[in-house]
Amino acid sequence: MKILVLTNEKLNGVLFYRCVMPHAYMARNHQVKYTNLLLLMPDEELEKYDILFMSYFNYDENDISRCRRLGVKVVIDIDDYWVVDRFHELYDHFQETDRKNNIPKIIQQADGVTTTTERLASKVGLYHDNVCIIKNVLMNDNFVNPRQNQIPLFAWVGGNNHTADLFIIQHLQKGYKFPVYVPEMYRLIFKDNFLYYPPQPIPNYLGLYNEYDIILASLRDAEFNTYKSPLKVMEAGMFEKPLIVSDVDPFSEYLRHKENCLVVKKPSEWAKWAKVLSDDEDMRKELGKNLNADVVREFNIDVETKKREAFYTSLSN
C-alpha cells in the first residue's frame, strides 16, 4: 500500500501522534511519504498513492477534489471536539472560524475518518458512517531513563491553551511549596505560582518525563475535555511515572486509585496526594510500575497499527 501523509513545516503534538509517528511505524511494511506541498505534486505522482491521510486542520477543498478525480482515497483525522464553552481560551477562535459548522462539513468530505476515542467517535459518527478509532500510542522504545533528583519534583507536561487546567493546581507551588514545573509559556499568567521548564520541540518534550518524579494531570471538567484522548495517562505510564490525576473523562476508565495512580475527586486532594507521594518513594515506584503495565496493554502500537492497516485496506480495495 502507498500512503501519502500531509503534514506542516512545523511539527506539533497532533501531527506527531496522529500523522508522523504512526505512519513511520507503518513504513516498515508499506510505502509512506510525507509532504506539506501537495499543491506542487503533479497528478501523475499523486495518483500512484492509495491513501492520502491528513488532520482536519490541513483540509483543503482543492486537495479533496484532486484526490477524488485521481482515485486516491482520503482519510481525515479528527482528534478534538469542535465545540468549546465560553471559558475556553480558544472560544473566540472557534467562533470566528465557525468551527461548530465547518468541522462536520470537513468530516463529510472524507472517504474515511480516524479518531481517538469511542466518545469522540460518537460525535464524528453523526456525520460519517465510516469511522475508525485509533488510540494515541508511542513506539515501543526504551524511554525510561530517569534522572535522580535530591527531592521529588512535580511536573505538568503539556502545551498551550491549558490555562484553566493549570489554575486547578497553582496553589501547590506557592501555597504548599511543592516544586511544580510547567511550560515557560505560562510564566506571564502564573508568575511565581509555578517553576518553569524551557520550551521543548516536538517530540523532545517527552524527555521531560525523565526529569521529574511525579506527574500531575489536572483537567477541567468540561464537555470539550471529555472528548480528548487520555494522552497524559498514556505518556506517564510509558515512563513509569506516578500520576496524580483529575477524576474526569477522558482519564476515568484507565484509573485505579491507589493502584496505578492517585485520583483527585475534590480540590483539597491535590495537596493531600502530593504530600503522600513526596514522602513515599515505594508508593511512587509501585504506582508507576502498575500504570506502565496497564498502558503497555491498553496502548499497544502493534494493535493500533493493525487497525489502521485494515481500515486503509478496506478503503483502497
Image (cartoon, helix red, strand yellow):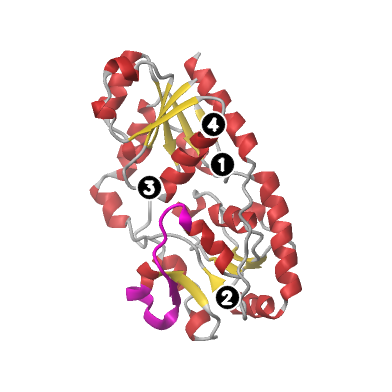
Q: Name the residue under label 4.
A: 26
Q: Which residue is drawn at 45% across and 43% down?
A: 79
Residue 152, quarter of picture:
bottom right
For label 3, the crowd category at 10 Å Cα-Cα, with few meaning under 14, some 14 to 19 and many 20 or more, is: some
Rounded to the nearest angstrom, the CA distance separating label 3 from label 1 is 19 Å
Rounded to the nearest angstrom, the CA distance separating label 4 from label 3 is 19 Å
Q: Is residue 33 magenta?
A: no
Going by the numbered disc 2, the residue's amino acid type is Leu
- Residue 117: assigned label: none
Rounded to the nearest angstrom, the CA distance separating label 2 from label 1 is 29 Å
Q: Mark 1 points at which residue?
A: 135
Rounded to the nearest angstrom, the CA distance separating label 4 from label 2 is 37 Å
Say if 50 sits above or below 15 in the image: above
Location of residue 315 in the rendering, given as x and y in whole percent from the top left corner? 49, 19
Kind of element beneath mark 1: loop
For label 2, the crowd category at 10 Å Cα-Cα, with few meaning under 14, some 14 to 19 and many 20 or more, is: some
Question: Considering depth in this image, is 53 or 257 the residue closer to the camera?
Answer: 53
Q: Mark 2 points at which residue?
A: 153
Going by the numbered disc 3, the residue's amino acid type is Leu
The mark that comes first in sequence, 4 or 2, is: 4
Task: Kindly indicate whether the residue at mark 4 contacts the one at mark 1 (C-beta within 8 angstroms).
Answer: no
The mark that comes first in sequence, 4 or 3, is: 3
Location of residue 204 in the rendering, given as x and y in whole percent from the top left corner? 47, 56
Q: In this view, does 19 lie to the left or right of 145?
A: left
The mark that comes first in sequence, 2 or 1, is: 1
Q: Which contiguous range is marked in magenta?
A: 187-204
Q: Name the residue under label 3.
A: 11
Residue 233, quarter of picture:
bottom right
Question: Considering depth in this image, is 227 or 58 the residue closer to the camera?
Answer: 58
Q: Is residue 189 magenta?
A: yes
Going by the numbered disc 4, the residue's amino acid type is Met
